[in-house]
Image (cartoon, rainbow, N blue to C red):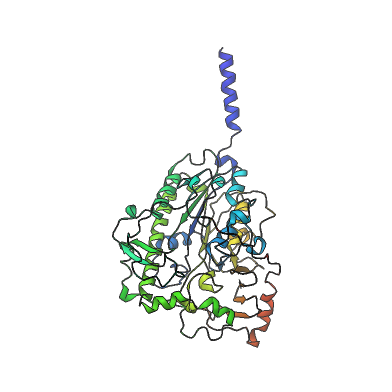
Amino acid sequence: MKISILILFLCSLTLRAKEPSVEQSGKPNILFIALDDLNNWIGCLGGHPQALTPNLDRLAAQSVLFTNAHCVGSACNPSRTAIFTGQSPATTGLYRNGQSMRELLPEAELLPDYLRREGYYASGSGKMLHYFINASSWDTYFPDKEKEDPFPFTLYPEERPVSIPRAGKWMYVETDWAALDCTDEEFGGDYAVSNYIADRLADPDHGEGKPFFLACGFYRPHEPWFVPKKYFEPFPLESIQLPLGYKADDLEDIPERGQKYARNRYFDHIRKHDQWKQAIQGYLASIYFADCQLGRVLDALDKSPHKDNTIVVLWSDHGWHLGEKEHWQKYTAWHDNTNVPLMIRVPEGTTGLVAGTQPARCTRPVSLLSLYPTLLELAGLPEREENDGPSLVPLLENPNASWNHVAVTHLDHPGDMGISDQEYRYIRYRDGSEELYHLPTDPHEWHNLSADHTHTKALEAIRKKAPTKLAPLRETPLKS
């Protein structure tokens, strides 16, 4: 009897030894953080002098901060689809918000799907994909993944609009802003997301013995810009500064196709109702609110048993215009919309980068399309042929490494795109018209150099980098 018990005990030890812990497997945990509609208005990127982002700046100071990072698509759906599939709109044909990813790409292996197949535990909260969760990709999610609604309860005013009247059916109902008399907990939304993520990080058993992929999707600063009033208080209306990139006659040297992307009815409507500074105030307040929720997550990670084995990646799906190019919202190929925060922190001992990362600023042109292959390499997982982007690991190892890639952003129609290299921003439209900007001397893209013969060589070089194979636009209705 004693011998039988001893044998059973030894067998149990053997079985446990065959189930490697995170430390034994060598695979790092991944904390994958997204903010929605955040441009370069954060302190470390200097996009607006009044931006208050201590936690974004804290993470940037610990990470490789990519100052020349760009979204893949000019709106939420194409950008997020590209990140989670590793494929460009030029490959998938998904260029717009109104297309259904699940109908267009039913067989696509999303990033959490791949990681789960390779032994990861995938959990998350908030907006990662475009207004749905894709329940089958996750082990656990908050809110309940089966409901396919990524948004926890959020307190909004009972009567809307609050600050600006709707001008017609063309106007997005969420274009509105106001300071709410409530606490963070009463507001819910991203506060609830940060609670869920912080609790997962505090749990030593999160992942159930597997390395975890933990996705944290903050919705702010996406419209509507309703947040608790304490986040408005640091931005008195009388002191609000207009966007650095606004210039009244900025469109004079832009081709007709570009002007159609530029001027829109929102900006005129906002100025007509004398709400420009109020809207900027709302955007700054929403950024500050999101930053504070990020701080709660970073604090939880600092206290977490997973701190020393967790990669942190933070990104935004695209930027946002607040009057630059006489435009409001997103959907353009200019820097205000394409340049996004991207920061990556890799701990020492990580499989694909044993030395980890050192704090640095990288000015190489990179695309969010690279996140999928980068995480696979860092985790020591097999490459995936379907991935269209290059891994960023060489730049994480040496931010000044040679880099022959450009960052391409596709607009809502194949053939309309923006391309960034080390110094220039090139925009090409499907009618053949072009724009070219030299960012070191013209950071706000005020001077179109495409007809300036002194920049012909640079223009010809970046033209050759444009993708030539473009999948046609594939129309499917978005089901939300």
Residue 389 showing in the rendered view: no
Q: Residue at the far top: name it.
A: 1
Q: Residue 321 location, x and y as percent?
A: 47, 72
Q: Residue at x 65, y 78 (%)?
A: 431
Q: Quadrant of residue 465?
A: bottom right
From the viewer's side, name the closer residue of 404 and 244: 244
Q: Residue 366 location, x and y as percent?
A: 59, 65
Please determine whether, in this image, residue 294 is positioned above or below residue 265: above
Q: Residue at the far front: name it.
A: 169
Residue 120 showing in the rendered view: yes
Q: Quick check: 184 left or right of 448?
A: left
Please determine whether, in this image, residue 290 is positioned above or below residue 134: below
Q: Residue at x 58, y 45 (%)?
A: 27
Q: Quick check: 308 left or right of 290?
A: right
Please determine whether, in this image, residue 223 is positioned above or below residue 251: above
Q: Residue 51 location, x and y as percent?
A: 40, 69
Please determine whether, in this image, residue 263 is positioned above or below residue 297: below
From the viewer's side, name the closer residue of 241 and 89: 89
Q: Quadrant of residue 84?
A: bottom right
Q: Quick check: 442 left or right of 274?
A: right
Q: How many marks?
A: 0
Q: Residue 220 location, x and y as percent?
A: 43, 61
Q: Quadrant of the N terminus?
A: top right
Q: Quadrant of residue 387?
A: bottom right
